[in-house]
């Protein structure tokens, strides 16, 4: 600055120039500092963001595999539907959060605007169904039943419907072949939740935002196999989504198909017969309660005795699984789960539990033999058994004199088992046994028969049932002592007295407990599937199988077929001789015992049936009926709650199922052509070269056809109504018979009244 | 000095011939400020590479020719250098006399923009588009006119030795001269240019030695105006959101916030040495809008990293440092004020442009001097370069 001549320049200007220079340099310094901060300090984070920016994933969802029956008939498959979805993100950009758009959309779709808005709201703790429990960034399906016209209306006026799309999509379908419903076995799907996505993120089968996940039944059990793997193509893209780099693609792997052991025709017959039996039961008068039977729920299991494979499994009441497809409506959801619903989502074959009643006597018989009682000893079958002032009656006071164990099983003599159980209880030390002293043969046998734990059937959420042994009593008492002691009164009502007693000695094995237990009453609980395992083992010589529905997993291309082999779960704790004796006794139940009145005319010499009836008492309710049966190939278990006796409620229904399996007519003649499954299905359906699986056509309603064919003599073809002719199906033969029902109408089958009640 | 041809530089030492003459201590070549010139050339060349990187894939604007913008940027630089030479040849003192003509032309230019001849590019209605892809942004030249005009008025009586400082009347005149084109530019609206002009006015007033009352008065008035605009809700909420989006991109995620965010990602991902020229994914993928013009700095940030982007700041620093020196070393107030005005212009425009890509300044449509693609801007900054050189060349030699 020394070289500046004095030309009117003043210090003020010089100072200000320096100020400007300092300002300018500090501005540049600021830029440099900020640049350092972004690039050096935060650089790694931005680099990551940049790489996420320019890679786009295009996800091609995998087609979910089908669930097929044993012959290849689809029980669950996919169909293409026009799905109308709404994007929440786009809707929320509207000034009114999309209300106007949704209302307009509801108008086009002919839906209620409130319902449409409920469908797009997000689920949380306070929001009831319907609501969206998937990702908020994913298009939310409003309906999958849009017509082509509605879809066009939406697409052509895209500017009127911001955020709304109408696209064809593959959606689940439950086609119900031959009217078989199979709802609880198949289960259902619903959209994946954020939690599940996070959890499955690092596993080998991560979820996509748009995935549907199996929530129950086979859909859930085999979800991983059915789901397949979505294809992901990664593109390097520019800001407009144009591809600028190499694409890296993993193609979608369609889900595998699941071949089950279910036979849709038998399934239909089982469902039809169960439903019918319940209807009939509701017309029967119950002497004890003075009203008709309620028959409010029931289940039936048809299982291959030698493999444990389930041929049919039905639970009533039931529902249409298609209500889940495309999001369930509020009304439907209430109907399925509300307080006033009859809980049709429950699969009562594996989730329904009740006292087994006399069907439990096979366990008691085995326990008695194990405890050392000889098979042919003369055990007095008196009309009642008294223990210290308490009288335990035989069913309807019957008296058969001294009989063998086999005969006791056959006539279901309660007092024989009372006495045996009572003797064992006393041997075990009575009410205050020494530690380690009780042998508990009767309880041990129950566990050995697989009670009190899951059978391991390939369906989720199976319940265990309960064996009321000493251990259970102790824990149950501990859990309930407080309330029992509070509520119990020594001289109160029946319930109060029971509570009082329980409070005092509920943890102890009382004499009455053991006596009741021996005939399957009291606190014992079993599931139909557990009974199926036990009676199946009796049929096959003593091997208990883990019941299974999945038979094979066939990859979508048909190249890999993974068979699911039957698994043994144990042996019945009985000798060959005992087994043979029980087999005879249970055959006797059919020919002259408690089930004989329902199996008159059955060709026992050709197809030997075995059965055990059961009637379980339930406090405050009508009795639960049980009918456990087996032939050499199958075991059929049916139970109906609040329906009276086993034979009375289910005898005809079970016989009809056997009729259908073996082609037996009402008069006992066997016509192989009518048999749906005279021997269990051995092989798998044929897989074609393209991976599709052959399947025969299924008649419109095999159950009605069966009913018709069983009760009618063959007739000429001319009488067959043209409209119902079926081709290429084994049901064809059954269809050729003319209907000749006593009451002239298939739908009214079973309006016959049951003339008398039987022994339980 | 009117009419004196600067190139002959007569009166400064004896006439010589050949290299001796060129290298002589008082020759034109020796008197030019080489650091500032080389920095400007370097910035222009770096700019051409960055512009090329940003546009070689943008088929929708480069007419299918990946070199389209590269060639034009180099051409603009060449024309700019020619304009600089012309400016040096004419001399800043000659241009002082031409101020009325320049002022009239500038006003005419920006008024034309307001007529149907003007067109809007990227939200700023500040262009006159001629045929053949040639367009002009008159507001760039208004900046020069304002600097020259105000300097002329403010320095006249001081350089004549009548006064030590410009008096109030002169200041009012100068402000009046500046405010007319500024109002017109504000009407376009081209707020970015107006902001630069405000800074130029402040710089010019500071350097002129005008009373502190004027400087602080203007600063205070500006602050009061900003508060008034904010408090009286003159702007809509969305306008404020857009303005504030530079600091918080989520305020306007689809608009300005998007630009800011993508720009920050581009620069941040560069790290120390960058992704390498032509290898930036943000640049190749065209995630940053206006990357060859207003957001050209992001290309440097991503592909050349801290080293390359820092170099640009350093080169700008060299230019501004030398310009400040030129302002300080010249003998007459006129040259001082012109140089200071150019410093204020370059400094603010660079700070605003780079600052907005770094997310510390609001987003406005201002080019980065020498680096950004754009003819009008390029020409204007090279003319300014010529003015600086002219001031430098015509300063008295120290004894």
Image: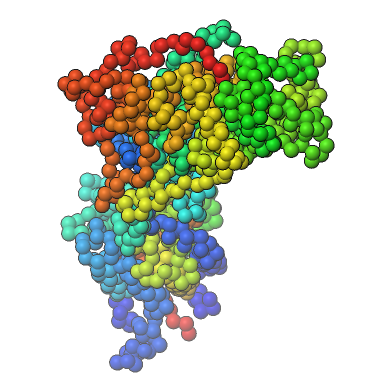
Total labels drawn: 0
Of A189 and A383, the residue lying toward us = A383
The residue sitting at 33% across, 67% down in the picture is B53
Residue A265 point in image, percent of width and height: 34, 31
Who's the residue at 53% across and 20% down the image?
A: A594
Colour mode? Answer: rainbow
Residue furthest to the top in view is A290
Front residue of this view, candidates A276 and B355: A276
Residue A649 visible, this orientation: no
In the image, A479: left or right of A711?
Answer: right
Can you see residue B129?
yes
Residue for point 50% across, 21% down: A592
* Snapshot quadrant of residue B100: bottom left
Position of residue A596 measured from the top left corner of the image (x, y, whole percent): 48, 20
- Position of residue A465 relative to residue A642, above or below, is below
Whole-percent x, y for residue A155 in the image:
26, 35
Q: Position of residue A398 (x, y in %)?
A: 62, 15
Quarter holding the N terminus of chain B is bottom left
Q: Please report the residue visible at 41 percent of the width from the left and 56 percent of the height from the top.
A: A53
């Amino acid at each position: 600055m020394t070289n500046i001549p004095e030309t009117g320049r003043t210090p003020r200007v010089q100072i200000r120039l320096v100020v400007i220079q300092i300002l300018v340099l500090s501005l540049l310094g600021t830029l440099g500092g900020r640049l350092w901060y972004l690039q050096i300090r935060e650089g790694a984070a931005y680099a990551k963001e940049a790489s996420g920016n320019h890679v786009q994933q295009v996800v091609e969802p995998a087609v979910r595999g089908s669930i097929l029956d044993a012959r290849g008939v689809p029980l669950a498959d996919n169909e293409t539907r026009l799905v109308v979805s709404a994007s929440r993100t786009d809707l929320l950009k509207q000034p009114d959060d999309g209300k106007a758009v949704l209302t307009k959309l509801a108008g086009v779709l002919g839906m209620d605007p409130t319902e449409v808005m409920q469908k797009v709201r997000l689920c949380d703790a306070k929001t009831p169904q319907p609501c969206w429990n998937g990702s908020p960034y994913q298009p939310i399906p409003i309906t999958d039943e849009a017509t082509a016209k509605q879809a066009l209306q939406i697409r052509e006026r895209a500017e009127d419907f911001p955020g709304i799309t109408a696209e064809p999509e593959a959606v689940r379908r439950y086609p119900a072949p031959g009217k078989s419903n199979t709802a609880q076995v198949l289960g259902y799907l619903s959209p994946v939740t954020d939690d599940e996505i996070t959890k499955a993120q690092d596993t080998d089968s991560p979820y996509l935002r748009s995935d549907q996940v199996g929530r129950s039944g086979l859909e859930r059990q085999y979800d991983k196999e059915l789901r397949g793997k979505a294809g992901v193509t990664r593109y390097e893209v520019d800001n407009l989504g144009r591809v600028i780099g190499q694409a890296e693609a993993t193609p979608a792997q369609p889900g595998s198909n699941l071949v089950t052991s279910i036979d849709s025709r038998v399934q239909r017959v089982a469902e039809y017969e169960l439903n019918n039996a319940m209807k009939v039961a509701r017309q029967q008068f119950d002497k004890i309660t003075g009203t008709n039977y309620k028959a409010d729920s029931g289940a039936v299991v048809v299982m291959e005795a030698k493999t444990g494979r389930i041929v049919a499994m039905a639970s009533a009441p039931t529902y249409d699984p298609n209500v889940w497809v495309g999001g369930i409506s509020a009304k439907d959801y209430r109907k399925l789960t509300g307080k006033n619903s009859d809980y049709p989502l429950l699969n009562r074959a594996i989730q329904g539990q009740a006292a087994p009643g006399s069907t439990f006597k096979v366990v008691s018989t085995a326990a008695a033999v194990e405890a050392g009682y000889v098979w042919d000893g003369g055990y007095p079958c008196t009309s009642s058994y008294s223990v210290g002032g308490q009288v335990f009656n035989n069913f309807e006071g019957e008296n058969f004199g001294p009989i063998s164990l086999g005969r006791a099983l056959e006539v279901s003599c309660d007092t024989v088992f009372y006495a045996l159980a009572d003797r064992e209880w006393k041997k075990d030390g009575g009410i205050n046994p020494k530690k380690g002293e009780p042998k508990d043969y009767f309880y041990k046998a129950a566990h050995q028969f697989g009670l009190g734990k899951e059978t391991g059937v390939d369906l989720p959420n199976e319940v265990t049932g309960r064996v009321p042994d000493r251990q259970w009593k102790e824990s149950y008492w501990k859990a309930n002592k407080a309330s029992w002691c509070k509520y119990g009164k020594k001289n109160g009502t029946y319930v109060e007295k029971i509570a009082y007693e329980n409070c005092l000695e509920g943890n102890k094995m009382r004499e009455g407990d053991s006596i009741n237990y021996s005939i399957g009453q009291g606190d014992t609980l079993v599931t139909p599937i557990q009974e199926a395992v036990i009676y199946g083992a009796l049929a096959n010589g003593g091997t208990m199988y883990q019941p299974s529905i999945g038979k094979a997993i066939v990859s979508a291309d048909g190249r890999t077929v993974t068979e699911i082999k039957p698994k043994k779960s144990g042996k019945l704790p009985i000798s060959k001789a005992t087994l043979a004796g029980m087999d005879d006794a249970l055959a006797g139940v059919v020919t002259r015992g408690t089930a004989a009145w329902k199996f008159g005319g059955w060709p026992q010499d050709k197809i030997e049936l075995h059965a055990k009836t059961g009637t379980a008492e339930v406090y405050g309710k009508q009795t639960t009926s049980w009918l456990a049966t087996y032939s050499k190939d199958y075991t059929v278990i049916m139970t109906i709650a609040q329906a009276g006796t086993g034979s009375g409620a289910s005898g005809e229904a079970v016989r009809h199922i056997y009729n259908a399996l073996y082609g037996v007519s009402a008069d006992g003649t066997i016509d192989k052509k009518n048999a749906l499954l005279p021997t269990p299905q051995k092989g798998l359906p044929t897989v074609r070269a393209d991976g599709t699986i052959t399947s025969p056509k299924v008649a419109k309603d095999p159950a009605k056809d069966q009913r018709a064919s069983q009760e009618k003599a063959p007739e000429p073809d001319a009488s067959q109504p043209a409209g119902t002719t079926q081709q290429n199906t084994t049901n064809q033969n059954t269809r050729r018979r003319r209907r000749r029902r006593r009451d002239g109408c298939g739908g009214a089958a079973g309006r016959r009244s049951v003339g008398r009640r039987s022994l339980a | 000095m009117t009419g004196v041809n600067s190139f002959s530089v007569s009166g400064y030492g004896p006439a010589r011939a050949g290299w001796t003459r060129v290298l002589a201590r008082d020759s034109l070549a020796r008197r030019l400020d080489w650091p500032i010139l080389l920095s400007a050339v370097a910035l222009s060349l770096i700019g051409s590479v960055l512009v090329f990187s940003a546009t070689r894939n943008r088929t929708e604007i480069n007419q299918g020719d990946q070199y389209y913008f590269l060639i034009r940027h180099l051409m603009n630089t060449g024309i700019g250098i020619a304009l600089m030479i012309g400016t040096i040849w004419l001399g800043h003192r000659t241009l002082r006399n031409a101020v009325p003509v320049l002022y009239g032309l500038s006003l005419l230019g920006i008024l034309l923009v307001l007529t149907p001849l003007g067109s809007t590019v990227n939200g700023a209605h500040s262009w006159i588009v001629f045929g053949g892809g040639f367009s002009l942004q008159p507001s760039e030249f208004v900046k020069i006119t304002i600097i020259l005009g105000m300097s002329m008025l403010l320095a006249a009586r001081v350089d004549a030795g009548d006064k030590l400082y410009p008096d109030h009347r002169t200041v009012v005149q100068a402000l009046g001269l500046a405010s007319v084109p500024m109002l017109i530019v504000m009407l376009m609206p081209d707020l970015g240019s107006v902001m630069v002009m405000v800074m130029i006015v402040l710089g010019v007033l500071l350097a002129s030695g005008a009373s502190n009352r004027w400087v602080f008065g203007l600063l205070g008035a500006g602050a009061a105006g900003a508060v008034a605009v904010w408090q009286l809700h003159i702007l809509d909420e969305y306008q404020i959101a857009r303005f504030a989006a530079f600091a918080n991109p989520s305020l306007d995620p689809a608009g300005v916030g998007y630009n800011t965010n993508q720009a920050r990602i581009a620069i941040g991902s560069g790290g120390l040495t960058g992704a390498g020229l032509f290898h930036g994914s943000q640049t190749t993928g065209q995630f940053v809008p206006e990357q060859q013009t207003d957001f050209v700095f992001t290309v440097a940030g991503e592909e050349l990293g801290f080293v390359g982007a820092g170099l640009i700041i350093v080169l700008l620093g060299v230019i501004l440092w030398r310009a400040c020196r030129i302002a300080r070393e010249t003998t007459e107030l006129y040259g001082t004020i012109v140089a200071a005005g150019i410093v204020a212009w370059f400094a603010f425009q660079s700070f605003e442009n780079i600052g907005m890509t770094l997310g510390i300044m609001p987003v406005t449509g201002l080019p980065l001097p020498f680096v950004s693609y754009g003819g009008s801007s390029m020409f204007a900054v090279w003319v300014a370069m010529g003015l600086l050189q002219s001031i430098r060349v015509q300063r008295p030699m120290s004894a």
